[in-house]
Image: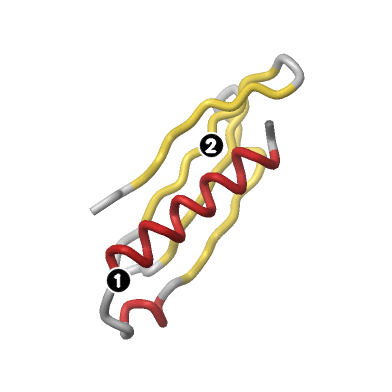
């Protein structure tokens, strides 16, 4: 099980920290936060309660987390 990703992205000489994590089955949400110098600049939340009911949740949630992390990294690169 992947619990999260942490990546530093440099854009125009500034370093941004992108953090994506799964909040778990009790709170089915993938949350990505973008930090600069410890301050949260942006956030994105993706609920996934409907995926839990479909069965193959591990792969689907991992894929969603990777996509969301990658999208945020690209938008700040």
- Residue in view at x 31 percent, y 63 percent: 59
Q: Where residue 43 sits in the image (x, y, percent)?
A: 60, 50
Q: How is the image coloured?
A: secondary structure
Q: Residues within 10 Å of mark 2 (few under 14, many from 20)?
A: many
Q: Nearer the viewer, mark 2 or mark 1?
A: 1
In this view, 19 is above or below 77: below
Question: Looking at the image, is mark 2 or mark 1 earlier in the sequence?
Answer: 2
Left or right position of 53 against 42? left
- Mark 1 sits on what residue? 57
Left or right position of 28 against 69? left
- Mark 2 sits on what residue? 18
Q: Where residue 39 sits in the image (x, y, percent)?
A: 60, 31
Q: Where residue 33 sits in the image (x, y, percent)?
A: 54, 44
In this view, 54 is above or below 43: below
- Residue in view at x 52 percent, y 65 percent: 46
Task: Identify the element where label 1 is drawn.
Answer: helix
Q: Where residue 50 sits in the image (x, y, percent)?
A: 41, 82
């Amino acid at each position: 099980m992947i619990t999260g990703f942490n990546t530093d992205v440099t854009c125009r000489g500034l370093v941004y920290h992108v953090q994506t994590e799964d909040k778990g089955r009790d709170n089915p949400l993938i949350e990505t936060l973008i930090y600069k110098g410890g301050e949260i600049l942006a956030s994105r939340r993706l609920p996934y309660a409907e995926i839990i009911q479909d069965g193959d949740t591990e792969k689907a949630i991992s894929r969603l987390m990777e996509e969301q992390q990658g999208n945020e990294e690209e938008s700040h690169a």
